Image (cartoon, grey):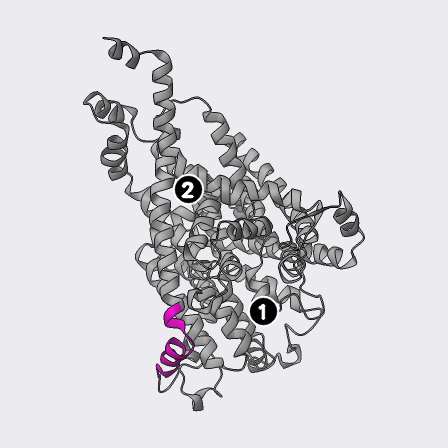
């Protein structure tokens, strides 16, 4: 038992090291100009929200933030519906050609989005989707939907078949069974899907950088990229921008922590 | 009567089954085909052409782009940079991940708290990681100031401006933002290990290090493969972090396949050649993922 203190010291040290970059960013974003000379690990003596206000208003981060919220929310909600519907068909319905659908979706698990941006850009251009939020949303959904269909199917398979059969015998249509019987008991899978899709959407840069060239449509990720390109010396601006990006996601994480960790592990191990 | 018999005819039922299933599958499958599957096939097609992405006619050049690719010194530089970058990240995430998971798996108070601390970087956007670490790596940034403060001032260097340190420095930043996930996956694997094994080892007089070496590590072998492949593929296709910091520089010290593809394809409007680079990236990542999914399927059986 003499080893316990050693373990705690080690864990505390590593945890601090892991959090240090974010803590220093938070400290610096709150420091008034005259305190910027102090080392970044020293907390602000007279914290100010001035930099947050100027980044939010002057650097258009209010617009970027709103755009990010819109895209990520729609992504998450639509993903829940389309992934669960497809998983319902694959788990509960009998129809010819099922193996082909499975094979198609399995291929989708292996496609790295980075590698297909050129044809994707041309597709979006042809459909007139460039510089629309819809264009980003449909691409987000398409690239991640296979993962969530498999995640949902894994959950649905644990639901007793009798539950669905009983509802069918009572005269419910497939859509009623899906919406009134299966979805209400699938809350954990729904939350995981919504959270992960929201997170991935919130964090993505590449698709948004390509598809959204008008400043008023840009998301936080693209806004941050250009902001840091032009304001390389504005440490207060950069750190407050990073915090505007990080804070909402940390709050959501702390509320739903269990779902995040489980979901990301399942997505990896299963 | 005719209507009733038609409703129950096998053909009609089959069509009905198709219709219902189709209704459920259509939104997901249609989106997937148009915005993921077909573009994946098209990237191969593009790679056989010369095209600026605008003009109506694409010039067919056969394997010309690949011929050029194999002789392209910068492509190979980007390729080996990608391999080095991936290797550093895998070594850190697997090595440190196993050790930290083994420590966290012990029944200690505050386990969840420590796990949360290590997981918070995982949920950060790569562009946030880019901004934070670029700032910390500046000549007068947190890393150099910290080194000076603990008497290691001789180690200070302009991390991202130096040809030899830029790539490893960014790899460390990438590992910072992914290590937590590796730890959690290892932890999931450790739950399968029977606690009695450790108790028995203790009674036999084994040291914690011996227990780690002879019980923990062998038990983790399957999960290690998972972490290895997931970490490697994530690193191989990374773009945001490098684009948000060095954009491939200084000179080409941090040029990786994704940034090289972006420069050739998007910035220079060279859709054919950019796609050839993309195909190289696609084939490597897809093969790794295919092997991984095969292993998973075999383990599940």
- Is residue B207 in view from this perspective? no
**Image-quadrant location for residue B158:** bottom right
Judged by its main secondary structure, the magenta piece is: helix
Q: Is residue A47 magenta?
A: yes
Disc 1 is placed on an element classified as loop
Which chain does tag 1 point to? B
- Crowding at mark 2 (Cα within 10 Å: few <14, some 14-19, many 20+): many
Does A259 appear above or below B155?
above
Secondary structure beneath disc 2?
A: helix
Judging depth in this view, the residue of B99 and B41 nearest the camera is B41
Q: Looking at the figure, which quarter contains the N terminus of chain B?
A: top left
Mark 1 = which residue? Answer: B245
Q: In the rendered picture of this protein, how many numbered marks are placed on residues? A: 2
Q: Between marks 1 and 2, how big is the CA–CA gap?
A: 31 Å
In this rendering, would A153 be left or right of A162? right
**Rendered view: B82 above or below A170:** below
- Position of residue A183 measured from the top left corner of the image (x, y, whole percent): 27, 38
Location of mark 2 (residue): A148
Q: Name which quarter of the figure residue B24 lies in.
A: top left
Residue at image coords 24%, 23%:
A168
Residue B115 lies, in percent from the top left, at 41, 57
Question: In the image, is residue B240 part of the stretch drawn in magenta?
Answer: no
Task: Tell me the subunit letter for badge 2.
Answer: A
Question: Is residue A245 positioned above or below B32 on the image?
Answer: below
- Give the magenta range: A46-63
Judge by depth and name the residue closer to the eye, A130 or A197: A130
């Amino acid at each position: 038992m003499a080893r316990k203190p050693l373990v705690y010291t080690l864990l505390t040290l590593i945890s601090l090291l892991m959090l240090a970059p974010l803590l220093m960013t938070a400290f610096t974003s709150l420091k008034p100009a005259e305190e910027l000379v102090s080392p970044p690990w020293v907390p602000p003596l007279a914290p100010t929200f001035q930099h947050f206000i100027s980044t939010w208003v002057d650097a258009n981060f209010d617009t970027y933030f709103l755009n990010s919220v819109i895209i990520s929310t729609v992504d998450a909600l639509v993903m829940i519906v389309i992934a669960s519907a497809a998983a319902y068909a694959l788990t509960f319905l009998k129809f010819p050609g099922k193996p082909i659908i499975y094979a198609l979706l399995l291929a989708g698990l292996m496609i790295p989005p980075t590698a297909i941006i050129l044809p994707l850009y041309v597709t979006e251009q042809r459909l007139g989707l460039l510089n629309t939020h819809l264009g980003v949303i449909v691409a987000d959904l398409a690239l991640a939907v296979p993962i969530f269909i498999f995640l949902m199917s894994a959950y649905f398979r644990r639901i007793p078949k009798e539950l669905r059969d009983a509802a069918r015998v009572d005269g419910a249509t497939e859509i009623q069974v899906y919406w009134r019987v299966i979805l209400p008991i699938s809350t954990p899978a729904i939350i995981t899907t919504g959270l992960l899709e929201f997170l991935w959407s919130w964090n993505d840069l590449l698709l948004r950088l390509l598809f959204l060239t008008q400043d008023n449509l840009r998301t936080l990720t693209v806004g941050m990229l250009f902001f840091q390109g032009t304001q390389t010396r504005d440490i207060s601006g950069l750190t407050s921008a990073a915090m505007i990006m990080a804070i909402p996601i940390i709050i959501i994480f702390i509320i739903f922590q269990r779902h995040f960790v489980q979901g990301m592990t399942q997505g990896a191990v299963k | 009567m005719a209507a009733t018999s038609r409703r129950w005819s096998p053909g009609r039922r089959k069509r009905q089954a198709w219709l219902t299933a189709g209704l459920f599958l259509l939104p997901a499958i249609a989106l997937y085909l148009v915005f993921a599957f077909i573009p994946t096939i098209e990237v191969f097609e593009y790679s056989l052409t010369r095209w600026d992405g605008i003009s109506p006619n694409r010039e067919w050049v056969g394997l010309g782009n690949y011929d050029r690719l194999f002789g392209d010194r910068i492509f190979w530089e980007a390729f080996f940079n990608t391999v080095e970058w991936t290797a550093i990240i895998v070594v850190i995430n697997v090595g440190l991940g196993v050790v930290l998971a083994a420590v966290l798996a012990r029944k200690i108070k505050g386990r969840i708290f420590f796990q949360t601390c290590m997981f918070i970087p995982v949920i950060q956007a790569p562009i946030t990681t880019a901004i934070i670490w670029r700032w910390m790596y500046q000549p007068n940034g947190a890393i150099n100031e910290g080194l000076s403060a603990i008497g290691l001032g001789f180690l200070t260097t302009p991390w991202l401006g130096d040809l030899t340190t830029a790539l490893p420095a960014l790899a460390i930043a990438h590992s910072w933002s992914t290590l937590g996930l590796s730890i959690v996956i290892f932890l999931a694997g450790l739950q399968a290990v029977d606690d009695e094994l450790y108790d028995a080892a203790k009674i036999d007089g084994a040291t914690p290090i011996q227990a780690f070496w002879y019980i923990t590590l062998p038990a983790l072998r399957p999960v290690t493969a998972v972490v290895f492949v997931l970490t490697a593929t994530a690193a191989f296709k990374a773009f945001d972090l490098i684009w948000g910091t060095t954009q491939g520089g200084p000179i080409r010290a941090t040029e990786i396949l994704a940034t090289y593809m972006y420069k050739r394809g998007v910035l220079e409007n060279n859709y054919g050649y950019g796609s050839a680079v993309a195909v190289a990236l696609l084939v490597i990542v897809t093969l790794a993922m295919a092997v991984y999914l095969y292993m998973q399927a075999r383990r599940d059986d």
